[in-house]
Image (tube, rainbow, N blue to C red):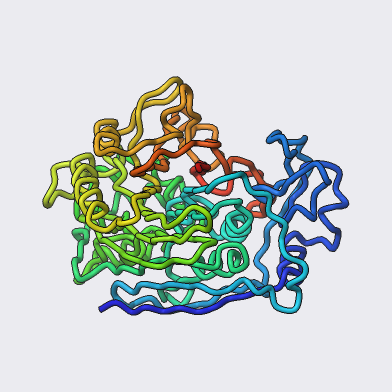
Amino acid sequence: MVMVMSSTTNFSNASRALLMLAWLGTAASCANETTNTYCTSADDCFADEICRDNICRSRSGGLANNTSNNTSQNNANNTNNTNNTNNTNNTNDVGGDDTGGDDAGEDVVVVQPEGVTFVTYNVGLARGFVSHSSVRVQPAADAIAALDADAICLQEVWVYRNADNEWVEDDIQLVVAASAQTHANVHYAITDAGDERVGCEQTESAPLLTCVGEFCADVSPENLSDCALANCQDEFLALSTPCQQCIGTNLGKPVSEIIETCISEDGGAAYSSNGHNGLMLLSRHPIVARGHLELPAVLVKRSVLHARVNVADHGEVDVFCTHLAADLSGSITYPGGDYASFEEEQADQIVKMLAWIEQTATSGRTVLMGDFNTGPAKAGLEAELAANFEAIVADGYDSPYADQAAPLCTYCGDNTLNADPATNKAIDHIFFKYASDYETLSVERIMDQTVELTTETGAESMHLSDHYGVSVSIK
């Protein structure tokens, strides 16, 4: 069963400004800062600057000296809506006119490049997997809302288990609310974990539990995976495959609860995040058709979202958003089933995805975006399952970002949220398959700035996600 929901969400610019000031913890206007300040619109910047990624930047594309010091805190006035998400395959569509309410005369100033801009960004809101997710979600949502893009593909905006042990959509609804004025048309699908269960034998988890207790006793459940992988990987890999799978899919809970779940008679779910795929499509233009394809996968549910977007002065564009299987072979034993490896699983996902796109896209303009967990070897970049990347290119897709002589990494060792300093890969892509010629206007890596956030141990400078984003403008 598919439940379709739509609503109109409008916030005045004055209301958004008040919320932002509360988040920053200051009553001073960003315009009072000297250079490269935090911003929500061009009005917060000097005349020769634009507001991009919530940072005042020079109109020439350069970045002024960063003097901002932004601190995030939980704000009781944010617009989170908590929803129980135990329904299977709910498709959620949010759209509405950007009327601006009583402040319609104070519209956000957006400086757009000529043409159409597409963005992909893995937000990394995987609680229990990527550190400080709960601290990063608000500033990440605000930065996404400020993106100068016609269509945005987001990955890893997951449902999560709250303090009452309920699966909720809070992070999803926070992103929807933050983008209500800039990208009011939203498409996502809530998939669930199904009935498959996995677990551990009564005694096999004891060495892992001892190791985690020794090295990670003071680490919050949200940040547990980094500590456990750094200190207890041998103990984890010694577990049976179903036990590894159960522990991995239950990260985010306290370790004692994870073990209790996995050694219980019923075991735990076979998929993380209650089987949710973590995908969202945002558009500033009307969505005239929607679709969702669930892909075969283990550990993490994988899907493809489709939105046919009617872009003024450009025509209809079939936009697809996905997040394919990651090669976790260095961290976990492949659970088996229909495939022999994560690489083989990903390859079949690509085959099924491309076939579905061929059947679904009708506009003659196809854009395929997301975290593909595959990428070529280029100058300064290491390959990641490169044959699977080439399979997409062989089907007639162009990747302006990867086609650069020396593209920057999107999953990088210099990212403060990544544990491996040697990692430099380009695995986040925007592919184009147009029946007619198009011109690439700009290609860039975005969302790579750090911000000052308050964590459980104090103020820290960190990136908004463990991935950087990609932006491509065409006409």
Q: Is residue 333 visible?
A: yes
Query: Which residue is rendered at x = 62% and y = 67% of the image?
Result: 181
Q: Residue 70's spot in the image, x, y percent?
A: 73, 51
Q: Height in image: 62 above or below 432? A: above
Of residue 259 and residue 275, the one placed in the foreground of this image is 275
Q: Residue 298's spot in the image, x, y percent?
A: 23, 54
Q: In this view, which residue lies farthest toward the top?
A: 379
How many numbered markers are drawn? 0
Query: Which residue is rendered at x = 40% and y = 66% of the image?
Result: 188
Q: Is residue 261 left or right of residue 287?
A: left
Q: Is residue 263 left or right of residue 138?
A: left
Q: Is residue 89 left or right of residue 240?
A: right
Of residue 397 and residue 74, the one placed in the foreground of this image is 397
Q: In this view, which residue lies farthest toward the left?
A: 338
Indicate the quadrant containing the N terminus: top left, top right, bottom left or bottom right. Answer: bottom left
Question: Looking at the rendering, which quadrant does residue 91 occupy?
Answer: bottom left
Q: Height in image: 381 above or below 374? A: above
Q: Height in image: 223 above or below 426? A: below
Q: Residue 385's spot in the image, x, y percent?
A: 28, 33
Q: Residue 415's spot in the image, x, y percent?
A: 54, 37
Question: Looking at the rendering, which quadrant does residue 360 occupy?
Answer: bottom left
Of residue 173 and residue 204, the one placed in the foreground of this image is 173
Q: Is residue 238 visible?
A: no
Query: Which residue is rendered at x = 49% and y = 36% of the image?
Result: 440
Q: Is residue 56 left or right of residue 2?
A: right
